[in-house]
Image (cartoon, rainbow, N blue to C red):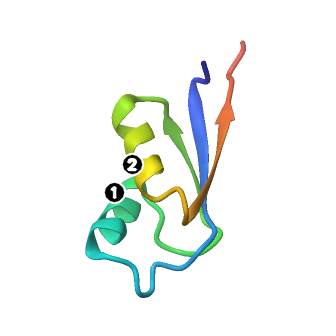
Amino acid sequence: MADKFEVTLIKSMIGRPQKHRRILKGIGLTKLNKTVELNNTASIRGMIQCVSHLVKAKEINNET
């Protein structure tokens, strides 16, 4: 399983429900094409799933 996720906002929040806007703000995505790196936890996976039509998520494996 991946250690982290790289999440990018690819669609605008305009016209979206307030719940989706709050989820994106909680993730740290406020502008289009902004990318954030998040830990792989159950709550983060749930947030990504709720707004999956607005974001692009990629798993990152940190092998050191």
- Counting from the top left corner in percent of width and height, residue 33 is at 65, 69
State the residue lying farthest toward the right: 64
Please state, as top left, top right, bottom left or bottom right, where the C terminus lies in the image: top right
Identity of the residue drawn at 36% across and 64% down: 25
Task: Quickly name the residue at label 2.
Answer: 47
- Counting from the top left corner in percent of width and height, residue 8 is at 62, 58
The one nearer the camera, 10 or 35, is 10
In the picture, the disc for residue 3 is none
Identity of the residue drawn at 68% across and 22% down: 62
Q: Which of marks 2 and 1 is nearer the N terminus?
A: 1
Residue 17 occupies which quadrant of the picture? Answer: bottom left
Identity of the residue drawn at 35% across and 67% down: 20
Taking the image as shown, residue 54 lies to the left or right of residue 15, namely: right
26 above or below 5?
A: below
Q: Tag 2's secondary structure?
A: helix
- Counting from the top left corner in percent of width and height, residue 21 is at 35, 71
Which residue type carries mark 1? Gly
Task: Quickly name the residue at label 1.
Answer: 26
The one nearer the camera, 43 or 25, is 43
* Local crowd size for mark 1, using a 10 Å CA cut-off: few (<14), some (14–19), many (≥20): few
Identity of the residue drawn at 46% across and 48% down: 49
Please state, as top left, top right, bottom left or bottom right, where the N terminus lies in the image: top right
Q: Nearer the viewer, mark 2 or mark 1?
A: 2
34 above or below 11?
A: above
- Counting from the top left corner in percent of width and height, residue 7 is at 59, 51
Q: How far apart are marks 2 and 1 (CA)?
A: 9 Å
